[in-house]
Amino acid sequence: MNKQFKIIAIKPLEGCASYILKRLQRNRLYYLCNGYEISEHDIKIVGKDILDNNFFQIEEGKPYINISAIVGKNGDGKSSLIELMIRILNNIGKLLDFENKNETLSYVRGVCGEVYYSILENDKEYTYRINSTSKNGINILKIKDYSTSKELTVYVDDEGKPILNDSVSRQQYEYLLEKMKASFFYTIVSNYSLYSYNVNELSPKEGEWIKNVFHKNDSYQTPIVLHPYRNNGNIDVNNEYYLSLQRLLYLFSKYESFRSIGNQKVELLALKRVTQSKLLSDTFKRYFESIKSKNLLNKEIELIKGLDKQSRDEYLEGILKILDNDIFIKVEELTLKGEGVTYKNSISDIEILLNNLNYRGNIPIKLNVAQYQRIILVQELSDLLLKKSLNSYTDFKYQDFHYWQNNNNPKPKSERQLTCEYILYKIIHIFERYPEYKGILDMYENQCFFLYQPDNVLQYRKNELERGLLLVEKGIREKSHITLKLRQAINYLKNIDKEITYFDLEEETKKSLSEFEIIKKKTIGSDSEYLISLDILKDYLELEIETTDRLELLPPRIFDTEIYIKQQKDNEYTPLSLISSGERQMLYVISSIIYHLQNLNSVSGDLIKYNNVNIVLEEVELYFHPEYQRQFIKYLIDTINKSNLSHETCINLTFVTHSPFILSDIPKQNVLFLKDGIPNYDMQENTFGANIYDLLHCSFFLEEYSGDLALIKIKNLIDEINSIQNNASKFKVENIEQKIKLVGEPFIRTQLYRTLYEIVGDKDKFKIIELRTELEELEKRIKND
């Protein structure tokens, strides 16, 4: 049974904003698959240039893959075309997702364009067009099925919400929408370039829509995602490393076939327990240090000085009461509902105080009780406090904290205790970092009526903390990426009393690995670590059936995790963190793709399941040696084939590339050559299996084969040769010979020698050079044979 999915073309339309188009031209079709002819009423195949449906299929019974590419110089419009497609898919995705509870996408204004695609099922090709336009201030979305000539047209407001009327009833709308969902596709865009997809560089007219296209956790319902995640335009390299390590560990433990990397094999997982909890080393420390470093604004000092003695004393008494509650609170129980986990904490809402690290205004204290610690650290206040010095009070608390940190807990903490403290730390961290939770920390603003009522402040804070925990619980249930580390800690806490522990897994590894003690001592060198075989970890993970997401069962962050690779040639073990950046990047890119494909495959129940997946890889050659670039497409196809994906899965891969090695694996029928923003059809030779130098010149419009500096030097050398006389000194000739010797290209080097020796009249020497060059070429051939 033949199946396939492909993106055929993208078309910018009249009315598309110039800041979106850049160099692209309106009303021009940009074909990613040639051999099609598109009109308003039909998409038909013309000629015989269409590739065979299984051209990229290496093994029978594996997912059907189509591959295309976009090439051109910098500034020719490659990224603009992809970004136009992303905007169109975003708007259509907003429409398809509108009836769901999860409205994650934001409608993009100013987009006018179309995307054409085809789906082959049972040897019949179905073609579609999706369209996002704006006319006379009205936003229009269209989805057309060419096989039935039916088209869904929906008018939407600036928020992307459908405007239903007599011509499109709700019943018609919902029927057509369900039909279109069945034939739509999921898009993954991967781009590791530092300067791509920066929300700060978007036109203000568009809004910040791109924020919502980055990694989402909605069970793969919203049909587009950008990778890696960027916060305010920045990639968090450390977090990306952690997530990549988690995905790799998941894949290595689940599929033995993934563990072979060239002549190396991934075999062992090492876990080292952290020596100090982040609750202590990060949250508490940062809190006290931030208090010590703050200064009071002069006008706030004057405000306090202006209070009468009674008001001042009442105000400061209230502050002391709040502070005491923060630092010395009775042990309370916090429970994550529905998770069966209860843990105790020895602080209350100290996390709320961390809001002061993000002070964003110049609001007087009487209008912003949240900023009370700004008072306690200012030297000038000590005269106002009579016998009570808030400054001394804070010094005492800070010193007490250091004593507790350094002297009061000499014994290593248990894994249970570390996990409980990590859960507290992570909840606080979530409150601090993520916008949807930051409202919890901003709750005090303009709470004037709390000024002299600290009991009300404490009750209000308790209510807000409970509200925050409910939000965290929601993130846990919805399996948000924000709560992944929290879910891992909770699962570990739930399983910590079971018969199988990491110690037991190490004991099993010890039985199966004859050189266990030698490897552990020589390679890892710490008695406090667990060393676990990936085969045994795989068996352990398969015992757990309560969660379908194996990532949640991986070791929590109370352990430093390292994966060890065995070198086949010498049986030495190397940590994954020490392999080259290019090797790691290859693993990270591939693991991210496979991870998303696996998750898309596992969607079940009433949720939309996308069998057709569009993967866009922009500048995937970043960090790669040419040899890795040459191997990448084959390696990616092999890895997809090992992933046990459903035979219903069809994948379209689009490479936006500057690499001739990538392009040499793709026939020119599936290559869009861009020059100055328009398709260029000058390429006559086939790209598939082509000579790299020809590809550079013809496909990437490279005008020269050598660097500009070398060209200038060679031109100067030619001028120098032409300027000498036939009676030039021996020193002068030898100096020029040394310069010619540096030229690497044999033909150019030979011609320079020829010119030099013709001028000085030394034909015998040129003959020697010719024969020497011929000998070198023969030796190379013999060596290669």
Image (cartoon, helix red, strand yellow):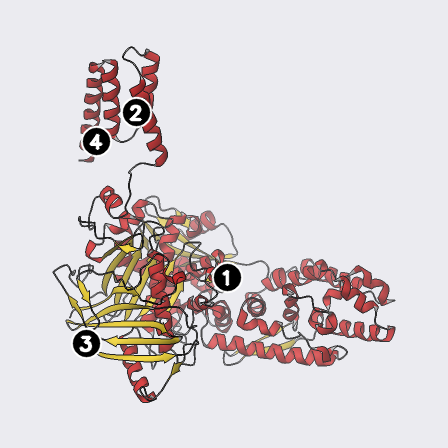
Q: Residue at x 36, y 59 (%)?
A: 80
Name which of mark 3 and mark 4 comes first in the sequence.
3
As shown in the figure, which amino acid type bears the numbered disc 4? Lys
Between 767 and 206, the one nearer to me in the picture: 206
* Residue mark closest to the camera, 3 vs 2: 2
Between 178 and 160, the one nearer to me in the picture: 160
Check disc 4 and report its element: helix, strand or loop: helix
As shown in the figure, which amino acid type bears the numbered disc 2? Ile
How far apart are the alpha carbons under marks 3 and 2? 65 Å
Q: Residue at x 15, y 65 (%)?
A: 45
Single out the residue that lies furthest toward the front. 136
Where is mark 3, residue-wise? 147
Q: Position of residue 548 (x, y in %)?
A: 38, 73
How far apart are the alpha carbons under marks 1 and 4? 53 Å
Which of the 4 image quadrants contains residue 104? bottom left
Q: Residue at x 65, y 65 (%)?
A: 359
Q: Position of residue 282 (x, y in %)?
A: 61, 61
